[in-house]
Amino acid sequence: MMHSCAWCGQLVVAGGVEQNGKRYCSANCARLSTAPSQFCPDCIATTTDKSTGNLGRLNGIGVALIRKGSVPPCPKCQSVVSRTWFTFLYIPLIPMGTYRVLYRVQQRLAGRSTFFARKLKRAEAKPAQSAAAG
Ligand SMILES: [Zn+2]
Ligand SMILES: [Zn+2]
């Protein structure tokens, strides 16, 4: 029997994950549904209210948000550090700003993922290795 994921809305034909009486297409969606929808205080403290604004690319030309793979997600709110780049033919050319980004919808819904972004106060803020305690 078919149902739709309670988180991303994708049709689930078989399998899926059940949690708290709701069905999800994947464990990731089940996890996201219970994840904080806001940045944790630590992340808010190191960022400003400035968001990325509208991002958009046409034929690979424009502004894209690219995750910094070297920085692990925040253990508290799952936000990741990403940077906006001006890209030309999908090649990142000019770094623009560094943000903490909290994705709210799985990216498998192509183009439909939404996110919250907060600009880091300092460019290239240090990975929060020492600030994890407390
Ligand atoms: Zn889902
Ligand atoms: Zn956080």
Image (cartoon, helix red, strand yellow):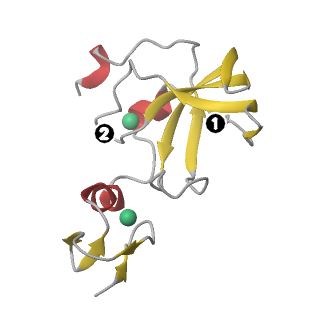
| Beta carbon of the mark 2 residue lies under 8 A of ligand 2 | yes
Mark seen at residue 91: none
- Ligand 2 shows up in the quarter that is top left
Of residue 101 and residue 12, the one placed in the foreground of this image is 12
Q: Residue at left 52%, top 58%? A: 109
Q: Which mark is residue 76?
A: 2
Neighbor class of circle 1 (other Cα within 10 Å; few <14, some 14-19, many 20+) is few
Vertical placement of residue 133 versus 41, above or below: above
Task: Name which residue type carries label 1.
Answer: Asp
* Residue 40, percent from left and from top: 40, 40
Q: Which residue is mark 1?
A: 49
Tell me: 20 left or right of 92.
Answer: left
Q: Secondary structure at mark 2?
A: loop
The 10 Å Cα crowd at callout 2, few under 14, some 14 to 19, many 20 or more, is: some
Q: Quadrant of the N terminus?
A: bottom left
Helix, strand or loop for disc 1: loop
Dividing the picture into quarters, in which one does residue 119 lie? Answer: top right
Query: What x and y, as percent, mark residue 123?
Result: 58, 13
Q: Residue at x 49, y 14 (%)?
A: 125
